[in-house]
Amino acid sequence: MKQFYPGCKLIIFDLDGTLYEDTDHFDYYASLLKEKVAIDDQERFMKNYEDMKKGDHPITIGKAYDVERDAILTLDPLTLKVTHVQKWDGSEWDSEDVKNTYRELTFDFEKMIAIGDGWWLPYSAARHYGVSIEETYHCYTKTKEFMVTDEFQLTMTPGLKEGLHKLKEEAEIVLVTNSEKDDVERLLNELELGDLFPEIVPLAQKPVQTKKIFLDLMKKYGVKADETVSIGDNLINEIAPALLLGLKTIYIQPTGIELEHANLKVVTSLADVFNQADETE
């Protein structure tokens, strides 16, 4: 970590997409959601989802989805202000309508969705095709259950376990995740990381509660913003709020991002962080 940010004293990790980077569970989730979609729309649902993964649909990671208006919002990556809006077919809203409709944005996980990672691609498509919140949650729960069976194998990030052990010698490490406590424990055990995090904050309700949680952790550990690092794969949940607070950040994004900031480092995998650390020693 020192090769990125010397002197950091508190490092806040995300879980999904950060400590493990597999994506097969998103496809499994999509397959369950498909069964909740009306039969006549199931083929369109799957095509939309596949297009989203390829970047051939208006919905992509880093945007937001307004369920009630069936509108796709492009956000400024630092301020999270709405810059323009598209319909499901990709056609653009009038700029005045955008300005008048979205003066302020509040994510609530039900009506306004922050599409921060792969979970939200099939979810957004399912909501577009009329799947209820209760049905999506049922499918999400089934997917989480699948992820701790022998059928699903998590890929160990090279150097992660050893790197975290070394990191604990020089800084406090905390895990902050939207997942439930039981799911977190099962996933950490599967990754052989069960004893590594002295503090875990489950059900964090990121991005709504991100700033509050980060401020509370900084106060608890007696550290300043420039001594704190947020690491995650979700720009909306972990990175943008941290930058707005003055924290350092490491953004895990395999495809890269056209964003520059003094407190932002972009890596393709968490393995890059620990492999570079080994090389500098």
Image (cartoon, grey):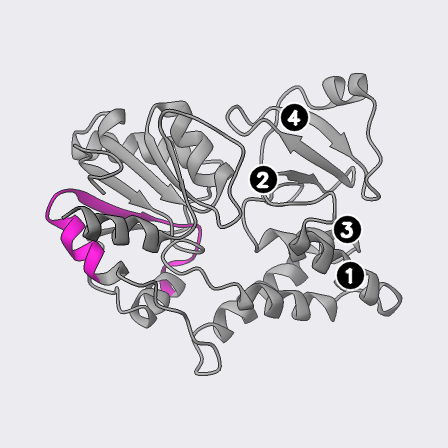
* Disc sitting over residue 82 in the figure: 4
Give how far across and how far down residue 256 sits, in percent.
51, 43
Disc 1 versus disc 3: nearer the observer: 1
Residue visible at 66% across and 65% down? 30
Separation of residues labelled 1 and 4 (CA atoms): 27 Å
Q: Secondary structure at mark 3?
A: helix
Point out the stretch of residues depicted in magenta.
162-182
**As displayed, is residue 20 above or below residue 258?**
below
Task: In the displayed orientation, state which residue is furthest to the bottom.
Answer: 150
Can residue 224 be found in the magenta stretch? no
75 on left or right of 2:
right
Helix, strand or loop at mark 2: loop
| Badge 2: residue crowd in 10 Å (few <14, some 14–19, many ≥20) | some
Outermost residue on the left side: it is 169
Image location (x, y in percent) of residue 33: 69, 65
Q: Amino acid at mark 4?
A: Val
The label shown at residue 62 is: 2
Which of the marked residues, 1 or 2, is nearer the chain's N terminus?
1
Q: Which residue is mark 1?
A: 47
Image-quadrant location for residue 87: top right
Q: For numbered disc 4, what is the local secondary structure?
A: strand
Label 3, label 2: how many angstroms apart (C-alpha)?
18 Å
Q: Which residue is mark 3?
A: 128
Q: Is residue 64 above or below residue 125?
A: above
| Residue 118, picture quadrant | bottom right
- As rendered, which of 75 and 276 lies closer to the eye? 276
The amino acid marked with disc number 3 is His
Q: Earlier in the sequence, mark 4 or mark 2?
A: 2
Query: From the viewer's perspective, is the residue at label 3 or at label 2 nearer?
Result: 2
